[in-house]
Amino acid sequence: MGANILMILSGVSLVACAIPLTYQMYQLLLLDAKSKGLEKPKLWAVIGASGGRGEGLLLYLLKRKNYSGEVLEVEQQKKYQLKKRLTILLLIQLISALFFLLGLFL
């Protein structure tokens, strides 16, 4: 019974973190695309943030390497804050996944 509750709670946590994780990734890519001067930065941010296995991010990074941009101090600070939020959300997802796996074996 305890293992089922652990799995349910960790599954809810995984799903609950996935939405803000995707949004924060979109915000980071949008800021990066604007600073690099890409055409249609919102489209590239959506492409980069979509895809569960990272294919959108890979496509964005391949497109991005052809552009060089100047990053302002304000943008750099905002990127740092977004990266911190992404790291925290990824850690929560990792811990939730570990608890989910633990629930499978209990």
Image (cartoon, grey):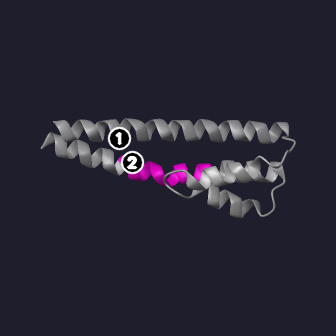
Residue at 69% from the left image edge and 36% from the top image edge:
80
Q: Is residue 16 left or right of residue 78?
A: left
Residue at which label 1 appears? 97
SS state under label 1: helix
| Circles 2 and 1 in contact, beta carbons < 8 Å | yes
Q: How many marks?
A: 2
- Name the amino acid, label 1: Ala
Q: Is residue 14 left or right of residue 51?
A: left
Q: Nearer the viewer, residue 71 or 5?
A: 71
Q: Residue 19, image x and y in percent?
A: 49, 55
- Name the amino acid, label 2: Leu
Q: Residue 105, image x and y in percent?
A: 18, 37
Q: Callout 2: 10 Å neighbours few (<14), some, many (20+)? A: many
Residue at 63% from the left image edge and 55% from the top image edge:
48
Mark linked to residue 14: 2
Q: In the figure, residue 5 lies in which quadrant?
A: top left
Q: Nearer the viewer, residue 14 or 57?
A: 57
- Does residue 36 belong to the magenta stretch? no
Q: Quadrant of the C terminus?
A: top left
Q: Residue 36, image x and y in percent?
A: 82, 49
Q: Callout 1: 10 Å neighbours few (<14), some, many (20+)? A: some
**Magenta-highlighted stretch: main secondary structure?**
helix
C-alpha distance separating marks 2 and 1: 7 Å
Q: Which residues are magenta?
A: 13-25
SS state under label 2: helix
Mark 2 or mark 1: whose residue is earlier in sequence: 2
Above or below for 105 versus 58: above
Q: Quadrant of the N terminus?
A: top left
Residue at 56% from the left image edge and 54% from the top image edge:
55
Q: In the figure, residue 85 lies in which quadrant?
A: top right
